[in-house]
Amino acid sequence: MSKNKEANLCRHLSVAAQNFPNDLAVAVQQKSFNKLVYKELTFKALDQRSDHIAYVLTKQGLKAGDKAVLMITPSLDFFSITFALFKAGIIPILVDPGMGIKNLKQCFIEAQPTAFIGINKAHVARILYDWGKDTLKYYFSVAPFDLFGIQSIPSLLKKNILQHPFKMEKLNKHAMAAILFTSGSTGNPKGVIYSHAMFETQIDILRNDYHIQHGERDLATFPLFSLFGPALGMASIIPLMDASKPIKANPNNLFAAIEKYQCTNLFANPALIERLGKAGCMQNIVLDSLRRVISAGAPASVDSLQQFSRILNKGTEIISSYGATESLPITKISSAKLLQTEKHTQNGSGICVGFPIKNTTLSIIKITEKPIKDWQDNLCLAPYSIGEIVVKGTQVSQAYYQRPEATLLAKIEDNGDIRHRMGDLGYLDNQGNLWMCGRKAHRVKSDYNNQNKCYFSIPCERIFNTHKDIKRSALVSINVRGKTKALLCVELKHPKCKDTLRLFNELSAIAEQHQTTQGIYHFLIHKDFPMDIRHNAKIFREKLALWAQLKYSKQHQDN
């Protein structure tokens, strides 16, 4: 059998089960009678349990190549069932419940799953909203009893005893291993096809670029990242929280889990970093077991990074990673280096997201909405030229599932490889560091002095965010007497602002001090920006733009 036919992510789990059978693989924090308790699995137990589940699923009729939607909260079942699916060659479809009912239904239509594995609440939603009614044949739950045609996995395990280790499927490394739907926070959710080769690359990056070693313990606040723990020989500690709404997590639960297991790694998005930092500083907590903190999902503010650093040992770095579901990670930067670039950010240079991961190639191309079929080196722009970010590497997805038009717009063929257009804008400096300037869809082409000027969201907003009263801002476009104009929506730190005229005059003065923002003189105060649930950092600008147009038109109609 060729090496191309020997791929399976679960081989890492099997090796760990052989070499370190009694080491902790997963621990899940729960509450019982107002007391925090923990359920655990060793590597051996996780390997055996996932073998057993793979066996009963295939015995019910599922086979390699079938697709199964997985809607289970982070738990021991989540790990066992996910690894079981991989072992059997069944393709898990992972969706974010926070994307909304309409988007979820569309995901089912596109993914065409054969099986649905979920908690009872997920099955109720499936029935109510007719998810997957045309393709689903198998229904499983993690409840202890069968119910209304839904088979209980615990019940199946009792009825079907596994006599021998399950024979893991050996697959082509480029075969589809999973479908991961984007969150929809930067556009319509799309199913990203993950291959075993992509997962292998991500494991190598975490091991080599982030220096994660066997025996470490990770407080995993994002389900997908938590799966990499056992593959790296690192225990995944799952805190009691809603993974789809980390901004609402109870910091004390996370602090308790870190303390109990002496976690060495923490993966968290910027909103959770900010929440933990505030709580930790108020309680004078020091998380002295942590060796590294990885932040991803959106750019973290320097203030929140500095605050969180106060509850870490001196020298423990917060590493910010840039990437997307389609390609993760791409770059990384330490909090210390990010702090050094903050003055440039406040003056409109964008956000530095660091240097590319090893064996990852970054390029900047001219902004266009048209597809690019074949890569040519002359597409690359010179350093400091703002354009669309393009990435090449073995962690890059090859296509979207059942979305040929989206694939055509996002992928560029390059002599057998694929380059991915990120949909983000930025530039490379002379050292090869990447600077982010915002989403391509969020740039504003505005009429300024009878000329078209292009404003980029991040550089503009970070300039205005230096004002002492501004919590955050969002650049949008409005129509003013037939011409497109840039308008800045602002959310205030203290919502009850009595002197808006003074504030707007000060913002206008700031705009005129920087070439990046000159020509922006329309401002509106919004009391509470619409934000994505997961990261609480991505602003739904499309909603704000509609609000701003109505608000501006009404104000000037009244005048």
Image (cartoon, rainbow, N blue to C red):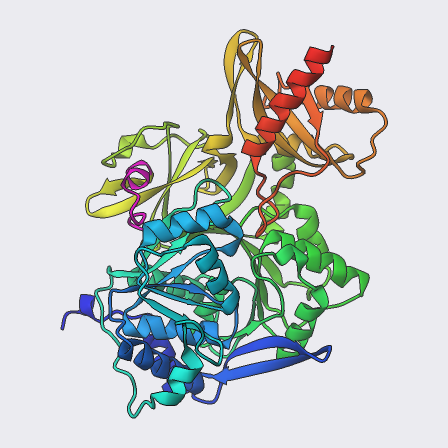
Residue, far bottom: 163
Stretch in magenta: 396-409
The answer to whether one can see residue 246 in this image is yes
Q: Quadrant of the C terminus?
A: top right
Instruction: Work out which residue is located at the far left of the displayed protein and give it.
Output: 1
- Residue 6 image position (x, y, % from top left): 22, 71
Depth order, front residue of 522/390: 522
Q: Position of residue 54 (x, y in %)?
A: 33, 78
Q: Most extreme residue toward the top, as rendered?
A: 450
Q: Position of residue 123 (x, y in %)?
A: 46, 64
What residue is at 61 percent from the left and 81 percent from the top? 38
Q: Is residue 532 magenta?
A: no
Q: Quadrant of the N terminus?
A: bottom left
The correct choice, above or below, for 303 with respect to 173 in the image is above
Q: Quadrant of residue 282?
A: bottom right
Q: Quadrant of residue 173?
A: bottom left
Question: Residue drawn at (78%, 34%), measured in percent from left and top?
Answer: 469
Where 162 sits versus 510, above or below? Answer: below
Q: Position of residue 241 (x, y in %)?
A: 62, 65
Q: Residue furthest front?
A: 148
- Whether residue 397 is in magenta: the answer is yes
Q: Residue at x 64, y 41 (%)?
A: 342
Q: Nearer the viewer, residue 19 or 142?
A: 142
